[in-house]
Amino acid sequence: MDKISDLKKIVIETLDLNKAQDIVSIDLKDKSSMADYMIIASGTSSRHIQSLSEQVLEKLKDKGVNDSKIEGKDSLEWKLVDGIDLIVHIFHPEKRKFYDLEKMWSELIPKEKLII
């Protein structure tokens, strides 16, 4: 396995161990240059979402992704952990349904629209 695949596995395990719900991984390699993978999960409360984001950030830093950070610190319904080649969105279930990132990023994108 390569480093990014290993990180993806570690992040998913961390989310699962900390009771995240509906964890989904999306391969972005042929869809965007911003990251190789996007992981989306739900938390049960604002405190749970904050805790999950901190746990993921800690794991990424432990594995040498020192430039990783949490976006959306003031939000109670959503956090993004920027792991450079791995992006992790953690949502409140209602906000996740509203944005529906799984549908947006899982669809095939025509090559002329591929550059984001």
Image: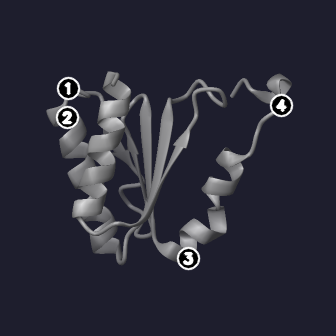
Residue highlighted by disc 3: 94
What is the three-letter code of the residue carrying label 4? Pro
Circle 4 sits on which residue? Answer: 110
Question: On residue 17, which mark appears?
Answer: none
Report x, y in % for residue 14: 24, 53
Circle nearer the N terminus (2, 4):
2
The 10 Å Cα crowd at callout 4, few under 14, some 14 to 19, many 20 or more, is few
Q: Quadrant of the C terminus?
A: top right
- Residue 2: where, in percent of width, then height? 34, 22
- Disc 1 residue type? Gly
Residue 81 appears in the rendering: yes
User: SS of the residue at dot 4?
Assistant: loop
Residue, x 65% and y 26% (percent of image)? 30
Tag 1 residue: 64
The three-letter code of the residue at mark 3 reads Glu
Q: CA distance from mark 2 to mark 3?
A: 29 Å
